[in-house]
Amino acid sequence: MHLKDCREKLRNTRVYFDLIQVLLEGGYRVYLTDVFKIWVSKSSNGYRSIRLNQKDCDRFIKVLQGELNIFKPIAVISWGKVANQTVKNLDLKTNHFAFPHPSGAANGAWRKLLGKSPTRENKVNFWKQTIIGYLNDLS
């Protein structure tokens, strides 16, 4: 998200910032983080992710819990199965809103949720209506 081209030009990452922009335009502050703080791959395996061992996963989940304890958010919004399940397992005392990951890999989940083609525009419009509605209900 720190690279302008990723936010504005690259088709596969632009949607991430589009969704974040909805929150910023709604007057919300946004703190972005990942469950797992690193992504490891080898070029020999086609740049597919190498699974972290359980000890490292547990460490990163503790870091995530610490981040949430520091910031005390009014809501946690997670994207994707791993993040959704991890946040659910943290048993937070705050609102958790789970969505499919914005990437094209989750287009099947988006199609089911939207009931139509998971285009960037359709994802953003659905997000805008849904998440702002959820957050406004908290006020």
Image (cartoon, rainbow, N blue to C red):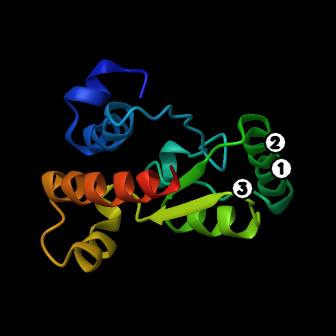
Q: Earlier in the sequence, mark 2 or mark 3?
A: 3
**Residue 102 visible in the picture:** no
Q: Which SS class for mark 1?
A: helix
Q: Is 5 located above or below residue 29 in the figure?
A: above
Residue 21 lies, in percent from the top left, at 32, 34
Residue 48 in the figure: left or right of residue 113: right
Position above or below: 100 against 11:
below
Is residue 48 left or right of 106 when viewed as pictured?
right
Mark-to-mark CA distance, 2 and 3: 20 Å
Mark identifier at residue 54: none
The type of residue carrying mark 3 is Leu
**Residue tagged 3:** 52
- The spot of residue 37 in percent (x, y) is 66, 40
Residue under pointer 2: 66
Residue sitting nearer the eye, 9 or 93: 93
Q: Which residue is mark 1?
A: 62
Is disc 2 in contact with disc 1, using a CB cutoff of under 8 Å? yes
Q: Residues within 10 Å of mark 1 (few under 14, many from 20)?
A: some
Of discs 2 and 1, which sits in the foreground?
A: 2
Q: Nearer the viewer, residue 44 or 69?
A: 69
